[in-house]
Image: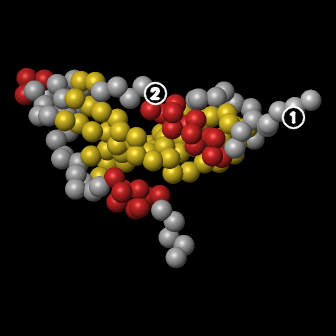
Amino acid sequence: MKKRSSWNYYGVKIIKQILVEGEPNPDLIDEYYEEDGGQTFEESIVLVRAQSFEHAYKVAIKKSTEFDEPYQNPYGQQVTWKFIDAVDCYLILEELESGVEVYSCFHNTASDVSADEFINKWFSSNDN
């Protein structure tokens, strides 16, 4: 009889960059429009069921990019969510439902901060 591998739940932290292209339509600008010239990164944790840490990263990356279709925001600009990196993974011992996002946080940065600089500042270990 073939032994079945153990499947566990993992939380995988995903970083995405939200790219907004084009100038806003002046007729659509309202009190909620922010013109700061910055950029936004999303940090989220995706819950997946996998056989190992490596497998968990692969599943989370696939799930987090499935629905990244560009769309138009209320100001007429095109918005694209760009996958940057999977920066952390941890084993969850409780029974949960696979594929549920369990955490999300947006990071606003200056517009001249590159994705690599953002990752290095917020998610790199300083254990040198």
- The mark lying in front, picked from 1 and 2, is 1
Q: In the image, what residue occupies the spot 58% across and 43% down?
A: 57
Q: Position of residue 124 (x, y in %)?
A: 48, 62
**Amino acid on which disc 2 is placed:** Glu
Which residue occupies the extreme right position in the image? Answer: 1
**Amino acid on which disc 1 is placed:** Lys
Q: In the image, what residue occupies the spot 40% across and 62% down?
A: 121
Q: Is residue 61 above or below residue 39?
A: above
Q: Position of residue 29 (x, y in %)?
A: 13, 28
Q: Quadrant of the N terminus?
A: top right
Mark positioned earlier in the residue sequence (1 or 2): 1
Q: Is residue 103 visible?
A: no
Residue under circle 2? 66
For the residue pair 108 and 112, the one nearer the viewer reads as: 112
Q: Is residue 71 visible?
A: yes
CA–CA distance between discs 1 and 2? 32 Å
Residue under circle 1? 3
Q: Residues within 10 Å of mark 2 (few under 14, many from 20)?
A: few
Q: Secondary structure at mark 1?
A: loop
Is 122 positioned to the left or the right of 100 in the image? left
Q: Position of residue 71 (x, y in %)?
A: 28, 24
Is 85 positioned to the left or the right of 74 in the image? right
